[in-house]
Image (spheres, rainbow, N blue to C red):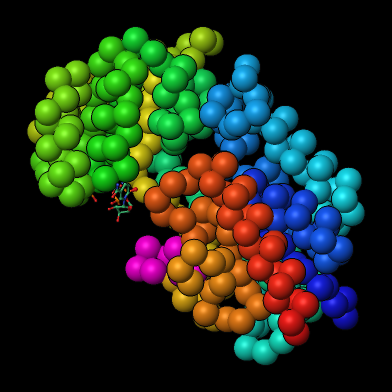
Amino acid sequence: MENIRCLIIGGGPAGYTAAIYASRAGLNPVVYEGMEPGGQLTTTTIVENFPGFPEGVDANQLMTDMRAQAARFGADIRRGTVTSVDFSSRPFKLTIDSDTLIEAQAVIIATGATAKYLGLPSEQEFRGMGVSACATCDGFFYRKKDVAVVGGGDTACEEATYLANLCNKVYMIVRRDVFRASQAMQDKVRNTPNIEILWNCNTQEILGDASGVTGARLVRKDGKVFDIRIDGFFLAIGHHPNSDVFKEFIDTDELGYIVTSGKSSRTNVEGVFAAGDVQDPSFRQAITAAASGCKAALEVEKFLLSH
Ligand code: NDP
């Protein structure tokens, strides 16, 4: 059975950054990229807030370059998804794609989180063409335009107020007649004049043409169907951290985010570390994920030296 010194699970900014540091430290890391090489960033277009790119950078290019940088230092990057784990003793045992068993001395979990979508065909059709699940990433493209945010939680309120600063008008599409968000966030939304809350509404369809999103068709609880004119449609109905496969061994919070120890990337299992969005319900940025991947690799290096 293959015995890997440093196994990195996940091919997003956290995983690739961990791989850059681990390979430069001579830890011979192996990366399993999972189902979505490049991670969540590949669902967007241009990244304008990643430092070092004054003109912005194509998201897919950024991820391709991070991957190539890790490979240049010798990281062994493979397609494949971890389908089960046994973290009860070291070396840890993991199954890849349900059929390949491997062992690892140390593991960095960097499997990310997946934004929840409504499940509408039109949502997929216009993904990256007006449909986004990240206002901080894409809001800037909608300056002085009209947009909608779906959801009534803290994320939706935060994204709506963020967008209200940039956009002409922000609709909030809330499926009940109350917010789920904290009172402070609700107050912020209510005190923002260019946010209009559409209570008791669900999205039936996102409307658009070859240039992208042009509107949304909503249905209110009383049966009324109506259209709004928008250029951008932002999902903020929650994220699902990709931690399910580890939960038997690794502590998570009530939402499924992996719990790490203080400022460290250590989990409750010695030798297993977590980086990026799978352990971060708050920031969820490529740059913060990359930074935590760096931290995890440095901690793995220390761990392997002392074991
Ligand atoms: P939440 O689960 O808190 O809220 C999700 C929202 O989306 C709810 O209003 C929910 O409606 C709505 N929703 C879910 N599914 C659908 C659907 N299919 N159609 C329409 N609406 C839908 O997720 P958040 O991402 O907002 O927050 C996650 C956690 O992170 C929370 O604990 C939150 O407090 C925390 N957070 C804290 C922040 C802060 O403190 N600054 C910032 C951001 C997040 P319903 O209420 O009807 O279920």
Q: Quadrant of residue 265?
A: bottom right
Image-based side of 166 in relation to 245, left or right? left
- Closer to the camera, 184 or 45? 184
Looking at the image, residue 159 lies above or below residue 304: above
Quadrant showing the N terminus: bottom right
In reply to whether residue 85 is colored magenta, the answer given is no
Q: Quadrant of residue 177?
A: top left
In the displayed structure image, the side of residue 197 where residue 295 appears, left or right? right
Q: Main secondary structure of the magenta part?
A: loop
Residue shown at 52% from the left, 79% from the top:
268
Picture residue at 25% right of the left edge, 37% below the top: 157
Name the quadrant containing residue 253. bottom left
Total marks shown come to 0
Split into 4 quadrants, where in the image is the C terminus? Answer: bottom right
Q: Is residue 175 visible?
A: no
- Coordinates of residue 25 in the picture (x, y in percent): 82, 61
Q: Is residue 279 above or below residue 249?
A: above
Question: Residue 237, image x and y in percent?
Answer: 34, 44
Q: Position of residue 154 (x, y in %)?
A: 26, 45
- Residue drawn at (49%, 60%), measured in percent from left and top? 279
* Position of residue 197 in the picture relative to residue 257 (left or right): left
Q: Which residues are magenta?
A: 253-260
Which percent across, then down, holds residue 17? Answer: 70, 50
Give the residue displayed 58% in from the left and 59% down from the top: 275
